[in-house]
Image (cartoon, rainbow, N blue to C red):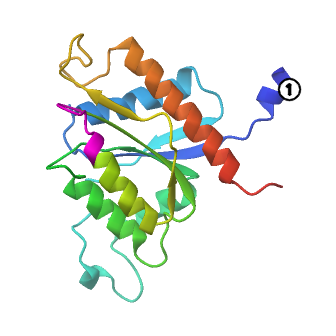
Amino acid sequence: MEAAVASKPVIKVAAICGSLRKASYNRGLIRTALELTKESIAGIQMEYIDISPLPMLDTDLEVDGKFPPAVEAFRQKILESDSILFASPEYNYSLTAPLKNALDWASRPPNVWGDKAAAIVSAGGGFGGARSHYHLRQVGVFLDLHFINKPEFYLNAFQPPAKFDSDGNLIDEDSKERMKQVLLSLQAFTLRLQPKN
């Protein structure tokens, strides 16, 4: 059994948060995912990719076939990843403008999202951000992203017991376990999509 675990390939996951607020609950979900991959899930190397430096999409900024430096750096991080974890807050039944901007920049030719596995998590009021999942999935279909089907993770942040502390860190143990299941599913699906050697 130990030999099987030791030989499991390591996947690279880019973690992207659609909220720019530091104490955002969605950013807290990303922090939890990062902790879980370091402490209790072998085989996942996750990196948080900050989308705040990206300029608003303007193709006039593409000069001589090159993107602005912040966009080039972002695109390279996506290109180097095997899969993507999106923390997608719901704004007006949809995904946020910063997240859509990041999706658009990385989809400029050549599309660097293509054929990557992805998962979506969210936290908020009401449906916990679930409606943003539907829109993000629709966008992802066009970008050739392949989302896990189960488990879904959308968390009503305001329903007792408390889910987050005042800094936006996830403190609810049941929710942490649900996040772990999302990451394990993303890992398994990513490995399924990779070509066999």
Q: Residue at x 43, y 68 (%)?
A: 142
Along the viewing direction, whichever of 61 and 69 lies nearer the viewer: 61
Q: Examine the image and state in which quarter residue 19 appears.
A: top left
Q: From the image, which quarter does the C terminus lie in?
A: bottom right
Give the SS element for disc 1. Answer: helix
Q: Residues within 10 Å of mark 1 (few under 14, many from 20)?
A: few
| Magenta-highlighted residues | 124-131
Instruction: Give the residue displayed 39% in from the left and 89% down from the top.
Output: 64
125 part of magenta stretch: yes
Above or below: residue 149 compared with residue 23: below
**Residue that carries the numbered disc 1 in the rendered image:** 3
Image coordinates of residue 194 in percent, x first then y, are 69, 54
Q: Residue at x 18, y 31 (%)?
A: 126
Q: Quadrant of residue 106?
A: bottom left
Residue type (three-letter) at the residue carrying disc 1:
Ala
Check if residue 28 falls in the magenta segment: no
Considering the image in quadrants, where does the N terminus appear?
A: top right
